[in-house]
Image (cartoon, grey):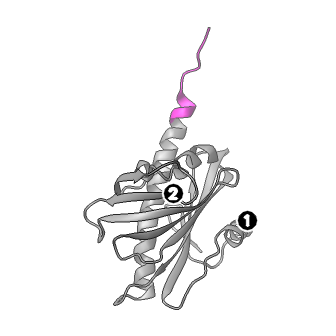
Amino acid sequence: MNVTGNGVVVGNGGIGGLESDFIRRHHRHETGDNQCSSVLSRHIKAPVHLVWSLVRRFDQPQKYKPFISRCVVQGNLEIGSLREVDVKSGLPATTSTERLEFLDDNEHILSMRIIGGDHRLRNYSSISSLHPEIIDGRPGTLVIESFVVDVPEGNTKDDTCYFVEALIKCNLKSLADVSERRAVQDRTEPIDRM
């Protein structure tokens, strides 16, 4: 994996022991001949509980995913729940139908699969896992997101991975921005005095 200047880690080679262990345990994808897969991560200067409070909200991805304008979930939020997502203009998509595959509040793991919609991401599934760490002496979070997706006709595996990685990097940057802003607000709330 290569760490970029903004704290995002991309790829599959040369990563440390703990991160590598998290990927091995939580980010297994069966990849077919005409599919691509990748793993990205980001270190966020906010505690796990705060970051997880955003990530686990399958019904409100627009709180940190900048390309989503609207999301509607029918029924209770549980494994198998479906969400209808409207995508902001500027992307080669308008809607996406997504299913919650796995949600573990203790281990901080969420998995989802795209099952329909107006876009080119066929057989897309992703896994997100959050792990506590210390950054600059304060509670922080390592977020790891992996995916597998079909390569559309006329595209290469590299082009497809590059496109999906770019979307995930934007989502992770936005997640970091929102989480870190909330973490600073939490630290600066006035203490009630009697």
The numbered mark at residue 179 is none
Q: Main secondary structure of the magenta part?
A: loop
**Relative to 75, 106 lies left or right:** right
- Between the residue at mark 2 and the residue at mark 1, the CA separation in whole angstroms equals 32 Å
Along the horizontal axis of the image, is 32 left or right of 138? left
Tell me if 124 is positioned left or right of 135 in this view: left
Q: Is residue 132 magenta?
A: no
Q: Secondary structure at mark 1?
A: helix
Percent x, y for residue 92? 29, 71
Where does label 1 land, which residue? Answer: 18
As drawn, 108 above or below 192: below
Label 1: few (<14), some (14–19) or many (≥20) C-alpha neighbours in 10 Å: few
Picture quarter with the C terminus = top right
Q: Determine whether label 2 and label 1 are within 8 Å by CB.
A: no
Let me know if residue 3 appears in the view: no
Can residue 168 be seen in the rendering of this structure? yes
User: In the rendered image of this protein, does residue 145 appear above or below residue 59?
Assistant: below
Residue drawn at point x = 48 percent, y = 78 percent: 149
Residue range (magenta): 185-194
66 or 69: nearer the viewer:
69
Q: Give the labeled residue for mark 2.
A: 81
Q: Nearer the viewer, residue 91 or 172?
A: 91
Q: Nearer the viewer, residue 117 or 121?
A: 117
